[in-house]
Amino acid sequence: MANRVNYGKLTDIIEAPDLIEIQTNSYKDFLQLDVPATKRKRVGLQAVFRELFPIESYDGKVVLDYLKYEVNEPKMGPVECIREGQSYSAPLYVTFRLKDGDEVREEDMYMGEVPLMTVQGSFIINGAERVVVSQLHRSPGICFEQNMHPNGTMLFSFRIIPDRGSWIEVQFDTSDNLYIYLDRTRRRRKFLASTFLRALGYDSDDELLSIFYTLEDLDLKGTPSEASLANRVLREEAIDVNSSTVLARRYEPLTRDLVKQMKAAGIATIRVVNVAWDDGLILKSIQKDPTHSTEEALKDIYMKLRPGDPPTTSNAKQMLKRVFFDPRRYDLGRVGRYKIQQKLGLPDEPDEAKGRILQKEDLIAAIKYLVNLRNGEGTVDDIDHLGSRRVRTVGELLENQCRVGLARTERLVRDRMTALDPSVEKLTPQKLVNPKALSATIRDFFGRSQLSQFMDQTNPLAELTHKRRLSALEPRRFVA
């Protein structure tokens, strides 16, 4: 390139910033070319391979694992690619390790070409300069909302929005019962929040109550004061042992007259719940809950989400684990985890992999915040505020596409492990992995995606504006 000569007499006070630094750094982090193969962070292309592998055969005898990838030097430079009508790309080689019984084989596989970004922040595809426009989308995290019901009641709700996976929506109805919607496209599939918490491992009513309320043992020997009886409800039925008469039902409010009857029946202490915190809002959902154990809750959820299948405890556990606790299917992302911790005041999660999936503590803290919001404490989020949005740059967009492309190969690899007979021919990574899956996905993204556009070359300013442009459009729908 020619040297630029400045004949001006005025000097710059500050150095001009790199206006496309976000785009160039994003793709640099995606490929991590300047990092040794064994020391790469779990981001970008490295994260995609680490999530998919290892792949194990159905019988567990054969395991295909990923070791590293290398991007070789491109065959032609950017200027030559434009002149020849070629793509500015480099060959991608991935090293796999196949463990077949006691035998271990390592092999480098050619997985296609990966486009390289030019110094100017553009890509050259088939001789034409292209720009991948960054995308403005709803940020993962948690969002508290309020809506007016037609009857005039203000309904409060929150949504836990992952970067990848199913949304959870929790909402009060007009009767102040707390419901959870696991599938926002089919809102009729709802169940009580207490049912979902039971399915997560809080088996008995006492375990559920201890999360939200203070459990007390009230001594009836003296004369209890009004303050000690206020906002107290019974945790168990009060029964007169002599006459076998039920003096009070479970969860009935404690009154002075009821205390007198229990003292007359010879009851010395009674177990109560202090509901002063929320005036019994959560207790209403626990009372209405048709399930009474973790097993019943799992079956109830499974019947509503999979109406045709016979409900079993193991199937229901597997379904819940697959939907919310499998890192391959559910990912809050670093941003989502930060947003949840910031809103709910939760401590930092030292294990990053564990922090990316949903935790029971997240749901409990969010329900407590929602109840406080219903009682006038806390703030509602504005979904149109730019603080509730984030930018997906080229590296993240391509990472998501690669994840979709490679996910299709997982079942194919397992089927080939079963179909190929090791006694006839040796299993090798070359025979198991289809290299076209990744290269076809990358080629399709740069060639057909709405966000991959021909660069505006009217003038240098138009070119720079195009590279910094944000798209509020997602494929197939608007972000409202």
Image (cartoon, rainbow, N blue to C red):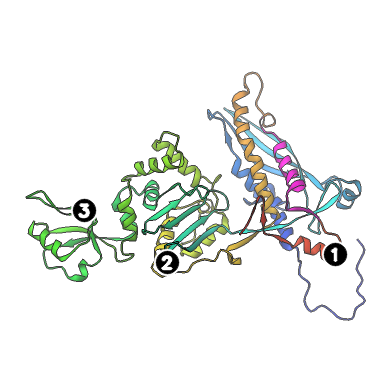
Asked if residue 443 is among those painted magenta in the image, a careful observer would answer yes
**Residue 155 seen in this snapshot:** yes
Query: Where is residue 377, by image quadrant?
Result: bottom left
C-beta proximity under 8 Å, tags 3 and 1: no
Cα–Cα span, label 2 and label 1: 51 Å
| Quadrant containing the C terminus in the rendered view | bottom right
Say which residue label 2 marks: 373
| Quadrant containing the N terminus in the rendered view | bottom right
Mark before the other along the chain sequence, 3 or 1: 3
Residue 160, image x and y in percent? 50, 56
Outermost residue to the bottom:
9
Residue type (three-letter) at the residue carrying disc 1: Pro
Q: Which label number is shown at residue 1?
A: none
Residue type (three-letter) at the residue carrying disc 2: Leu
Q: Residue at x 21, y 53 (%)?
A: 236
The secondary structure that dominates the magenta segment is helix
Left or right of residue 291, residue 338 in this image: right
Say which residue label 3 marks: 236
Query: Where is residue 430, by image quadrant?
Result: top right
Q: Residues within 10 Å of mark 2 (few under 14, many from 20)?
A: some
Cα–Cα span, label 3 and label 2: 30 Å
Say which residue label 1 marks: 460
Outermost residue to the top:
424
The residue stretch that appears in magenta: 432-454
43 w.r.t. 315: above or below: below
Question: SS of the residue at dot 3?
Answer: loop
Cα–Cα span, label 3 and label 1: 77 Å
Q: Residues within 10 Å of mark 3 (few under 14, many from 20)?
A: some
